[in-house]
Amino acid sequence: MAELDPDMYPNMDDIWHIDKADKDDVAPSAKTVSIVLLYLVVLLLGVAGNALVASVVVLNEHMRSVTNMFIAQIALGDIIMLLLAMPFDIISKYVYEDWSFGSSFCRSMSFFKDYSLAVTIFTLTAMSIDRLLTLSRAMRPYSIRTMKKFFTVAVIIQLLSLSAAIPSTILSDVWRELAYGHSNVNAVNASSTRVCKVSARSSKLLIVSVYRLLFLYFLPLGIIAVSFTKIKSFLRSTEAKMLLSSNQKIMVACKRALKLLLTLVGLYAALLLPTVVDTIVLFLGSDGSSYYNSKWYSLYGFLMDTALYGICVYKPVVYAIMSANFRRGFRELTCCVKGGSEKSIFDSLDDTSTLDTDEVWFNSDGSKSSVQHDVGDKV
């Protein structure tokens, strides 16, 4: 019988770092239990919320707009991170306090993390550019108004996301580092632990750091900022006021879609910021081991992980708060409430978030057109 790979199947003696004589008498600390329960809640909320979002879009024909298809794509990316990256990351850091899953799982975790983040930010970038194209008279023919165009853009986003995840996947590995006691950082209390990351002492760290910061944060957020600046400038123009003031439903729907998109982008930027700061500090620092074993880093690392996986949780909450259609969709799936006949006063006032409107530029006077387009989008 073949021997089991010790890196693939962790030794139970490594789960709690205690002496063999005492291991049977020591239970997990309250801190460890609290952290595991917290992330279990994050996992359940994130998977359930994103599964509801995707199901609402897939099962309701009237919800299958281009914008909502993008939203479903983001939800699937979040589920991938929560199921295929988060458990290994959290268990290794807060339960085993040692990476015991081998190099293959290490690279897989790195891949799914960056892939999910890339899907989110690249999709939000595409949605922002599309909003700008939709509101521009000259560029509107290039906006994503059909499912054929959506699938083309979706494939491009997937390819870009796969490319963005390659560097950290290839260059991540299991490294042995010295871990120190919290009370006295010295060689006496030091012990060797395994960590899954790109080594801080490796020249490859520059490649991964620059690549991740550029393509998962600064570049897409810069494009989104430019898009929203141009959109804001357009909405303040005399031309926009004349064209949109004649149809208040279109105006409200456009502003609501932009507000939803801006909220999603802003929270992504805020929650990923701790990871960005950590990457920059680690890259600029001369000694990665001293940085990781500093007294404050354990708390900062916990907050950083919580914010990172919070990216997978906040979006369904935003949809439920800002979109009447998603609220009704969630109720239909969870409470078996049929849409249309039962609508609250709050939802009826908020229902302008859903519009299958005619072409803005040719029907701003209220006239009927034979061609239907998504302007406010079904959000």
Image: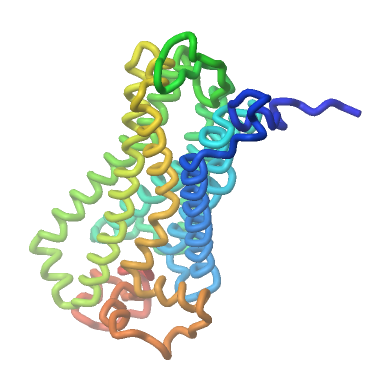
Is residue 24 shown left or right of residue 159? right
Q: Tell me the residue at 52%/33% (across/down).
A: 93
Residue 320 occupies quadrant: bottom left
Q: Nearer the viewer, residue 152 or 48?
A: 48
Which percent across, then down, holds residue 276?
Answer: 34, 32
Image x and y of residue 151, in percent: 51, 56
Rendered location of residue 275, percent (x, y)? 37, 34
Compared with 49, 226 (above or below) is above
32 over 341 or under it: above or below: above
Residue located farthest toward the right when viewing the structure as drawn: 1
Quadrant position of residue 222: top left
Give the residue at the far bottom of this rendering: 341
Q: Residue furthest left?
A: 238
Q: Is residue 125 left or right of residue 59?
A: left
Residue depicted at x 15% and y 77%: 246
Colour basis: rainbow
User: Residue 136 at x, y = what percent?
Assistant: 24, 58
Seen from the viewer's position, the closer of residues 75 and 353 is 75
Q: Could you say which is closer to the camera, residue 327 or residue 246?
A: 327
